[in-house]
Amino acid sequence: MKAFFLFIGKIIVVLLLSAIVLDFIYTTVFAQSKIRNKVENVINSKPQNYDVIILGTSRANNHFVSELFAEKGLKTFNYGMSGAHLFETSLLLKLMVERGWKIKNIIIETDLNLCNEKRDDGTFGRFMPFMHQSKTIADHFKNETDFAELYYVPFYRYIQFDAKVGLRAFYKTAIGEPTNVLANNGYYPLGFNPKANMKNNIESLVPLRNRYFEEIKQICKSNNINLIAVTTPMCSNVKGMGYFKKVKKLYPEINEYEHIVDGDEYFSSCGHLNDKGARLFTAKIIEDLFKK
Amino acid sequence: MFFNSLSFAIFLPIVFLFYWFIFAKNKTTQNAVLIVASYYFYSCWDWRFLFLLVFSTLLDYFSAIMMENSTTDKKRKLWLWLTIGINLGFLGVFKYYDFFAQSFADLLQGFGFHTNPVLLKLILPVGISFYTFHGLSYVIDIYYKRITAERNFIDYSLFVSYFPLLVAGPIERATHLLPQVKVKRHFDLEKAKEGVYQIIWGLVKKVVIADSCATYANAVFDHYESMNSLSLALGAVYFAFQIYGDFSGYSDIALGTSKLFGIDLLKNFNYPYFSRDIAEFWRRWHISLSSWFRDYLYIPLGGSQGGMWMKVRNTFIIFLVSGFWHGANWTYIVWGLINAIYFLPLLLQNKNRSNMGEIVMGWDIGSLKTILNILGTFALSTLAWIFFRAKSLTEAIGYLQRMFTDFHFESQYLNNERYNFELLLLVFVFVGVEWFNRSKVEPLSGKASWIKVTLAIMALLALGVYSDYKEFIYFQF
């Protein structure tokens, strides 16, 4: 039996050493990259100057055309991330500030995402390689129930979020293959989708006095950043548009733009404008909020 | 509690320590600790179904004794059919009632009668198909006087509920397992090490091969209408490796776990994708089920006695029943039927036992023919798997139709953010490892075992899929 325990002990040692080695290799590779997603693009950046930074979910990513801001002389980047919650958006802003970015204006999409204070695993996973590199990230995540495993167990974070920072992402990062996420200064245009489901039911959603939106407001205030919060368009066939009234009641400072684009021909799906619609919407935003 | 879960990684060492250090006094204490562990293991799914397991154990235990004590054949037969009836009755209610009710309603609707069938919508108790067949083999063996009834209830309970095989087999035989639980087990270092190697390799098959293939196979099958011929062919191949990695990986973990307790279970897989014809495939795939149907259905039906017509009839019966055993869906029945059709030419030409020996390869025409036969058999079984995987016959036929008529072969980007062909490399490596180790139970033991174990652990960490697809496919049966 002693020999068997020794055998098992050796297997555990091999397991631990393998985890430590893989953790080191993965972290080293991810730490060099800034061309595959918006999270690493911010984390591995040098200080930047922007007139406008756009934050939010896919409803920011697909709705704000950076090029139209640039035409008005506004240096702009769209950091909206598909699926992101305000939990990750707030962290991204903290990292921008920590890295010495000078930002004049932030446009943040604050509508459907106000009802959620939890993390989005897809976006959360992209921060994993940098947990030990940045105290800001570690502090932001420290209240998560699985923080201890993610932080202290070697390679666990890569296993847990293998779809985002697993072998495939590691390999693509190692060979330096860029994605299209950073093209068009972060704006991702959607096409017209004739088969799209042009209806949505948001009756069950309830907006919260969201702690991460409060955090974002606080960061902007203390760094002299002009924060512009907006709601973004929905298609015509939505049940529960009263949600936006509740948002307005909770946060009167949020600018209402949910009805600004009329006609389903401007939508790719019920909650996402196509490129034509996004250009219409962005033009309206610039006209209303960046009049000189 | 899945074999590839953290809870099992905690559970197994605890049971091991109790078994070898605290309750190692005699076989009764060893068996008792394994029964408690097995009942706990089973209750982790749904404790309510423990009653069903205990009832099934009691029923078969007492029926066997009554059968043995019966003085007339009539009484023996009565006990046999009573036990079979109750066992299959439970299986029927939980697994098949809704299927029959719905199929009957559909049939009536075909004749213009509209009915609303009463559906039970019961949750299927995990492992019911396995432990029911397990118990049935025991009472049938008693009836035919192949064995004597077990009088020790603890030993018999362990035979039925032993946790490594409880939820997805292998379907054990009393003649094989009972003699092992009736003696005190002594720790055997080599057997325990074999067990650990088999567990690690089983995990590689499940977490690396099956679950990786599952991400691709699901992406293709779930959107087959938008997939081209190449993607659909690859999707079918990926599913073939998913189900093999999943089920044979499970079986390896079960066999390996059992070896840690000094008990050998029946081998369930023998590199089935290296089979040279369909008959050989069925001697290598889910061996414990195939041999169960052979011994308890095919042979009692007359087997190969009574001429060619009887052979054909009995072959079709066991393939159809085998398909239906997997699940209450026409897709499984058609899957069984397709395999019977594949088998038929071999049967008619009396060639169903022509590939019984080892595969020997060399640089000659015979070896080339063997390789082509292996590829052909794999292609046939993969086509049949499409019916096994599809949610309905319409989906399976649509899938096949599109695969053979689309004629577009460019690589497609899948909804799961992956290209369709990247996984092929991993599958090729896996096939290579299995091919060069086909004479062994697993590839990790032997020369340079530490290097192989390290590579397997690295593969588990780096290539494993952990964020999704954790369930073993055969748990649903």
Image (cartoon, rainbow, N blue to C red):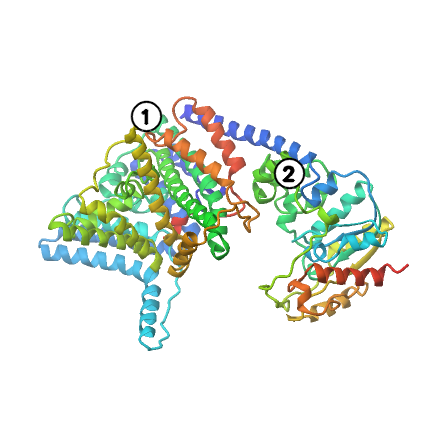
Front residue of B31 and B291: B291
Amino acid residing under circle 2: Glu
Q: Is residue A251 visible?
A: yes
- The vertical placement of B359 against A251, above or below, is above
- Residue B175: image quadrant is top left
Q: CA distance from mark 1 to mark 2?
A: 42 Å
Front residue of B107 and B187: B107
With B248 as the anchor, is A192 left or right in this view? right
| Mark 2 lies on residue | A177
| Direction right: furthest residue | A292
Q: Which subunit holds the residue at mark 2?
A: A
Circle number at residue A95: none
Give SS at disc 2.
loop
x, y (%) of residue B401? 40, 56
x, y (%) of residue A27? 65, 34
| Mark 1 lies on residue | B363
With B175 as the anchor, is B270 left or right in this view? right
Amino acid residing under circle 1: Trp
| Residue under the image location 39 percent in, 28 percent down | B193
- The vertical placement of B440 against A64, above or below, is above
x, y (%) of residue B42? 39, 49
| Residue under the image location 79 percent in, 38 percent down | A46
Q: Do the residues indicated by labels 1 and 2 lie within the same chain of the protein?
A: no
Q: Nearer the viewer, mark 1 or mark 2?
A: 1
Q: Is residue B328 visible?
A: no
Front residue of A136 and B451: B451
